[in-house]
Amino acid sequence: QVHLVESGGGSVQAGGSLRLSCAASGDTYSGYSVGWFRQAPGKEREGVASISAGDYRAYYADSVKGRFTIQDNAQNTMYLQMNSLKPEDTAMYYCAATLGWVGYPPFPWRYNYWGQGTQVTVSS
């Protein structure tokens, strides 16, 4: 079982950048599908970026394509680099992982392990 801990959220102005980190304990990310999700008040949780186990290409939601990049260090930390942030990116961001390949798009119900969430606020 893997335990996920996120860090790196905060408040930025539109156009700024943030890098979220998600550290895994209890296991490495090897063999896991990993993803980043976000949830704004009153909205459903949505997958913004993911890499399924064994894949080399990442999935990105249309709303973040070209601005966000998911990365992992092939050990126990993954990242979400967020550039050119917009006010509509404001949300609680969660990292998630699950053993095996789960495909795309990243549906939350396919992921078994979740971080506690980190708030990202983008002001105009």
Image (cartoon, rainbow, N blue to C red):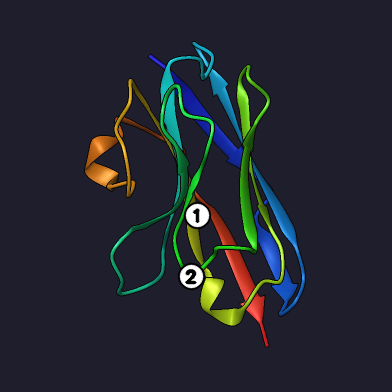
Badge 2 element: loop
The amino acid beneath tag 2 is: Ser
| Image quarter in which the N terminus is found | top left
Residue 38 x/y as whole percent: 44, 58
- Count up the numbered dots: 2
Q: Residue at x 33, y 59 (%)?
A: 45
Label 2: how many Cα within 10 Å (few below 14, some 14–19, many 20+): few
x then y, percent, for residue 4: 50, 29
Q: Nearer the viewer, mark 1 or mark 2?
A: 2
Q: Residues within 10 Å of mark 1 (few under 14, many from 20)?
A: many
Going by the numbered disc 1, the residue's amino acid type is Tyr
How far apart are labels 1 and 2 at the CA level?
15 Å
> Is 4 located above or below residue 47 in the figure?
above
Residue hosting label 2: 63
- Give the left or right position of residue 82, taking residue 51 as reference: right
Q: Which of the labelled discs sits on residue 40, or is there none?
A: none
Does any portion of residue 20 appear in the rendered image? Answer: yes
Q: Is residue 116 visible?
A: no
Along the line of sight, which residue is nearer the eye, 88 or 56?
Answer: 56
- 74 or 58: which is nearer to us? 58
Q: Residue at x 45, y 33 (%)?
A: 34
In the rendered image, the residue lying farthest to the left is: 109
Q: Is residue 33 above or below residue 104?
A: above
Quadrant of image for the C terminus: bottom right
- Residue 48 location (% of width, % of height): 46, 56
Which residue sits at x=52%, y=78%?
88
- The answer to whether 1 is drawn above or below residue 43 in the figure is above
The residue drawn where x is 71% and y is 71% is: 84
Q: Earlier in the sequence, mark 1 or mark 2?
A: 2
Element type where label 1 sits in the image:
strand
Residue receiving disc 1: 93
